[in-house]
Amino acid sequence: MELDKKKRSEISSPDSPALKELCASLHQLAIDLEIPEENGLCKWPKTQLDLCAKYGVFKWFLEEKDGGFGWSDQDLTLGYLALGSACQTTTFVITQRTGACQKIAQSLNDYARSQLIPNLLRGTHFSTIGISHLTTSKQHLGQPVLRAMKTQKGFMLNGFTPWVTGAAHADTIVVGAECEDGRQIIMVVPTHIPGVKIVPADQLVAFSSSQTSRVNFEKVEVDIKWLLVGPARNVMGRRIGGQTGGYQTSTLALGLARAAIEFILGESQTREDLVVPAEALKSQWYTLRETLLNSVSGREVANAEYLRQECNSLVLRATQSSLVIAKGTGFLSSHPASRWCREALFFLVWSSPQSLINRQLYQLAEVLPD
Ligand SMILES: Cc1cc2nc3c(=O)[nH]c(=O)nc-3n(C[C@H](O)[C@H](O)[C@H](O)COP(=O)(O)OP(=O)(O)OC[C@H]3O[C@@H](n4cnc5c(N)ncnc54)[C@H](O)[C@@H]3O)c2cc1C
């Protein structure tokens, strides 16, 4: 295929012209995603991820000492904004892959780092993550869904991780589990070891091509050499092991909003009645972009939950405006406006702590919090 033959230069900064080139390819390739194939699954974005590897995208997220480019948080945000407006599915998969890479790279486990990081940087190894059951999923059940028991060799895992993006394509999954005494661990689990059962991915409202699925663990004994963090209390709150959320979800929401706003601005060139709403959405987008960049760079830190709520509001309004403008034609599932609307709904459920869910609900119900 033409896309694979071309020689590419790595994107070493967000101003690189190669970033525009990559985004144009991702935008074009997005048309093939979200359409169920003969096996009932939507196409996994393999071509897109291979392209990202060739352009050096996976190096953005790791420090120079680990072989990465060590991009600043501001540059990463600019990179994600560009990728997110070109193809949300690929960008979302990259966030989950990066979550796994960073947990491996930031761990004190030299074995896991030396075995995995070089191939993760090259894009020849795919690792993903299943940790939401320690933070935002299954919290109301009052008991852990994935249990870890210490054995002579390492840890025995029993239970499941409810959500793992790209599980069927993963060589390894970074998972969180809870021990009997309430302490938690984060481990790398090679997907080929006995007892790892990847449940076929369901059709989703959007991002079906991310092939996100549940993974069952039936007496899976994982060697101690793969332990990244713990056993310790609240591993997700610790510095090593990483926190949830941050500004990443807001960044992807703004990336998607940009795609919809660019469409509306394009239409407003020939439809005068669209100019005022198009300009209003554009101006709100630039204001939020500035707040986001100030926050990630530490210049003027905004409350992450407040910013997330504002970005969610903009992405929902911008994508729905694109549908209003595209009218019945936009309602065809193949039209980008309908895809953007579906994708925007994801920001209502992705990595949302209870406090954010409450804020969101009050806003939707148009009730002021006490
Ligand atoms: C497309 C997609 C991809 C994802 N990818 C990943 C990934 O790669 N890695 C990862 O770690 N996570 C991933 N997640 C998980 C995500 O970040 C959230 O954790 C998840 O969306 C939370 O939803 P839940 O249904 O699991 O929440 P839950 O809180 O478990 O809710 C489950 C059900 O229980 C009900 N419920 C909730 N609270 C209560 C209550 N108090 N009382 C009674 N019933 C209740 C809800 O109504 C809901 O129907 C992904 C999610 C999606 C949708």
Image (cartoon, rainbow, N blue to C red):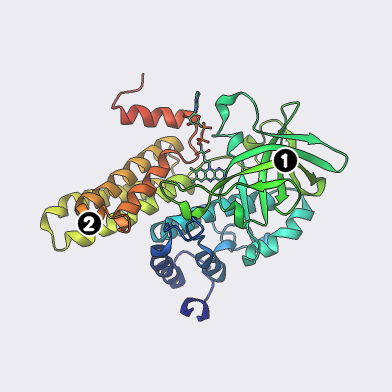
**Can the viewer see residue 316?**
yes
In this rendering, the answer to whether 60 lies above or below 194 is below
Relative horizontal placement of residue 100, taking residue 180 as reference (left or right): left
Quadrant showing the C terminus: top left
Element type at mark 1: strand
The residue carrying mark 2 is 329
Whole-percent x, y for residue 197 in the image: 67, 47
Element type at mark 2: helix
Q: Which mark is residue 283?
A: none
In this rendering, the answer to whether 141 lies above or below 311 is above
Relative horizontal placement of residue 221, taking residue 209 as reference (left or right): right
Please tell me which residue is depicted at 59% across the width and 59% down the height of the picture. Answer: 70
> Please, what is the three-letter code of the amino acid marked with disc 2?
Thr
Dot placed on the residue nearer the N-terminal end, 1 or 2:
1
Please tell me which residue is depicted at 63% across the width and 63% down the height of the picture. Answer: 121
**Can the viewer see residue 293?**
no
Label 1 residue near ligand 1, CB within 8 Å:
no
Outermost residue on the left side: it is 272
Please tell me which residue is depicted at 52% across the width and 77% down the height of the picture. Answer: 4
Whole-percent x, y for residue 253 in the image: 40, 48
Quarter assignment of residue 126: bottom right
> Please, what is the three-letter code of the amino acid marked with disc 1?
Glu
Quarter assignment of residue 62: bottom right
Within 10 Å of disc 1 (Cα), the crowding (few <14, some 14-19, many 20+) is: some
Relative horizontal placement of residue 200, taking residue 344 as reference (left or right): right
Label 2 residue near ligand 1, CB within 8 Å:
no
The residue carrying mark 1 is 218
Whole-percent x, y for residue 79 in the image: 47, 59
Outermost residue on the front side: it is 38
Whole-percent x, y for residue 183 in the image: 72, 30
